[in-house]
């Protein structure tokens, strides 16, 4: 089959590789019908996530048709059309049973690697480094889905791929990020980053009762989408100082909740950003926390900080003093996708939201290398790419 | 030169002590999750024959005997006199607080003789023994909680 393989920083190729096969009784094989490129994939593409190996198959946002089932998968049938959470979860451990699916104890065969870096291992993820499982991803014609009796959700025929594909990651991610803001009536929520995740944060914050949402980025078409499609007020941080502007817009108090939907590769303009780039380049610092710093400084006293943006390792000059002395609540994590599949599918079915609004590009799988390149450099007004095998 | 390795590791498993004890008490189950154990053959209620893979395509064999056991709580075993390797181990099952499963504590000791086999054994357990028993316990937990062992061995890649 054809699959998008990582071969090093800025080097992905569409290779011909063996078709996947069932390896365990709870596995299924899907024929992929749609798959997307995520901002998280850019961290791999740019070479910032350790323990990638040349030849690894990428992709964690995918859906398709069941073509083969392991003998223990009783709830699916050949031919079922399903979406698959990007987190792999067993359903039977302490964490799965407490609805903390991305923290599953049993799905990372390389748990020791993550334990060395993090103390404990989170769940395995599709196509996201050996430290997080080393599972082949779904930017391919076929994929093996472990624990297929727990993850995949069947999709009614009347919904199109594009309406449901983002249930695999970015819609639940935006939704959980908004939930982590503990939104109260009258609240103002500020969202750093108007990538696909940021867009779903904005929509979700309104769905959960925010009165105002303010979105921050510098890319005009992304700010425009935030404003026109998601009804956020916007700040272009290249034109004005975002911290000052937020203060002004919130009567001096600051936003009640702030979301970092940027993560480890934030772009920045001040001295601190220059410092981070230099340190990250020589690997003294693994992540560039420019957005996170702003979030902690901007958030109102006693407010909520929600971090869906991915951090992989070590951060420098994070104003922990601001977080502590302002009594902030910090919430973060890889999304517990399984928790959100059904409720968010219902939102789509009721027409509360059509997640396909973020899609700007549709490309054949063969053009994935070009897709990574334009998504990385935000060329051609690219916001979200769907690949068709 | 003879070498001694002692490792100890604990993992909490979301099953009752009785279930875990029963699975472990049948030593023929151990190779399912102990990666370097090729086979265990149970001879009678107390004695068993163990074969362990060693580097360079060799293997090491010994007879072991249960030296202490308390139902649903403890199993302890040791290699019998005259074995080429001195090995002992124990596993303890202790209910976790708040009905959160069972804490499983494993202790293993190997003493390898001088010579080629000794070197091989030392190599096998000398490098990262903690990680090795940690991985074995992860696999035991996976098997008990999910019925299978998470793996990517045999999956496709562009390598
Ligand atoms: N927690 C999870 O489970 C989860 C799931 C999916 C994605 N993510 C993470 O969410 C983040 C965003 O993903 P995406 O797909 O939207 O990525 P993306 O790269 O398309 O979007 C990031 C946006 O942030 C903007 N940005 C950069 N620096 C900024 C700054 N200092 N201030 C404000 N905006 C800034 C960029 O211009 C861009 O529009 C990534 O880190 C990704 O890994 C996390
Ligand atoms: Zn993603
Ligand atoms: Zn689990």
Image: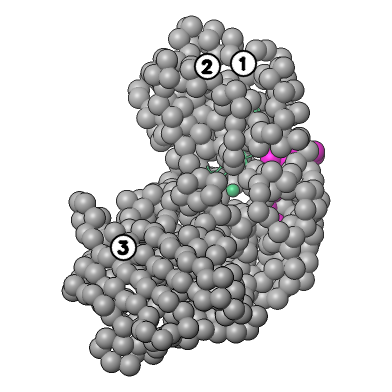
List the residue tagged with mark 2: A298
Relative to A33, is A359 above or below? above
Mark number, residue A113: none
Residue A28 visible = no
Residue A291: percent from left, percent from top = 61, 26
Q: Which residues are magenta?
A: A378-389
Residue B67: percent from left, percent from top = 26, 77
Mark 1 — on which chain does it sit?
A
Out of A219 and A314, give the one closest to the viewer. Answer: A314
Within-10-Å neighbours for mark 2: few <14, some 14–19, many 20+: many
Ligand 1 within 8 Å of the CB at mark 2: no
Residue A224: percent from left, percent from top = 66, 28
> Which residue does the image show at 50% across and 63% down from the upper left?
B129
Q: Secondary structure at mark 2?
A: helix
Q: Quadrant of the N terminus of chain A?
A: bottom right
Task: Measure how far apart labels 2 and 1 are at the Cα level.
Answer: 9 Å
List the residue tagged with mark 3: B104
| Residue at the bottom extreme of this rendering | B43
Mark 2 — on which chain does it sit?
A
List the residue tagged with mark 1: A242
């Amino acid at each position: 089959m054809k699959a998008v393989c990582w071969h090093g920083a800025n080097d992905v190729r569409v290779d011909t590789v063996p078709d996947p096969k069932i390896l365990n009784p709870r596995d299924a094989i899907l024929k992929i019908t749609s798959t997307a490129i995520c901002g998280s994939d850019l961290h791999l593409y740019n070479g910032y996530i350790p323990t990638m190996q040349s030849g690894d198959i990428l992709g964690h946002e995918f859906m398709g048709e069941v073509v083969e089932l392991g003998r223990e998968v009783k709830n699916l049938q050949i031919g079922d059309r399903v979406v698959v959470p990007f987190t792999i979860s067993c359903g039977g451990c302490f964490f799965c049973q407490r609805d903390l699916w991305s923290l599953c104890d049993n799905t990372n065969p390389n748990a020791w690697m993550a334990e060395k870096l993090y103390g404990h291992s989170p769940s395995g993820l599709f196509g996201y480094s050996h430290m997080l499982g080393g599972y082949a991803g779904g930017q391919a014609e076929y994929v093996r889905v472990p624990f297929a009796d727990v993850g995949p959700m069947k999709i009614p025929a009347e919904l199109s791929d594009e309406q449901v594909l983002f249930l695999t990651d970015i819609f639940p991610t935006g939704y959980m990020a908004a939930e982590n803001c503990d939104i109260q009536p009258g609240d103002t929520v500020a969202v750093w980053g108007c990538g696909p995740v940021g867009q779903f944060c904005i929509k979700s914050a309104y769905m959960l009762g925010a009165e105002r949402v303010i979105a921050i980025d510098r890319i005009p078409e992304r700010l425009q989408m935030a404003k026109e499609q998601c009804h956020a007020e916007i700040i272009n941080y290249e034109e004005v100082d975002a911290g000052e502007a937020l203060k002004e817009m919130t009567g001096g108090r600051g936003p009640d909740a702030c979301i970092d939907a940027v993560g480890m590769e934030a772009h920045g303009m001040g001295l601190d950003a220059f410092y981070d780039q230099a340190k990250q380049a020589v690997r003294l610092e693994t992540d560039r926390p420019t957005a996170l710093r702003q979030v902690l400084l901007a958030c109102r006293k006693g407010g909520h900080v929600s971090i869906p943006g991915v951090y992989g390792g070590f951060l420098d000059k994070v104003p922990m003093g601001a977080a502590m002395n302002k009594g902030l609540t910090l919430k973060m994590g890889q999304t517990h996708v399984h928790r959100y599949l059904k409720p968010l599918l219902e939102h789509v079915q009721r027409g509360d939201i059509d997640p396909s609004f973020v899609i700007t590009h549709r490309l054949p799988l063969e053009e994935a290398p070009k897709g990574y390149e334009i998504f990385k450099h935000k060329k051609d007004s690219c916001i979200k790419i769907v690949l068709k095998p | 030169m003879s070498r001694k390795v002692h490792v100890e590791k604990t993992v909490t498993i979301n099953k009752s002590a009785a279930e875990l004890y029963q699975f472990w008490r049948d030593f023929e189950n151990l190779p399912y999750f102990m990666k370097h154990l090729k086979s265990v053959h149970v001879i009678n209620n107390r004695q068993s024959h163990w074969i362990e893979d060693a580097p360079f395509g060799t293997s090491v064999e010994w007879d072991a005997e249960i030296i202490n056991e308390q139902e649903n709580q403890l199993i302890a075993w040791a290699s019998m006199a005259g074995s080429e390797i001195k090995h002992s181990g124990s596993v303890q099952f202790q209910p976790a607080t708040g009905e959160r499963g069972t804490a499983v504590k494993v202790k293993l000791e190997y003493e390898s003789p001088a010579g080629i086999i000794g070197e091989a054994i030392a190599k096998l357990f000398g490098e990262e023994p903690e990680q090795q028993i940690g991985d074995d316990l992860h696999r035991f937990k996976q098997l008990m909680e999910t019925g299978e062992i998470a793996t990517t061995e045999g999956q496709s890649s562009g390598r």
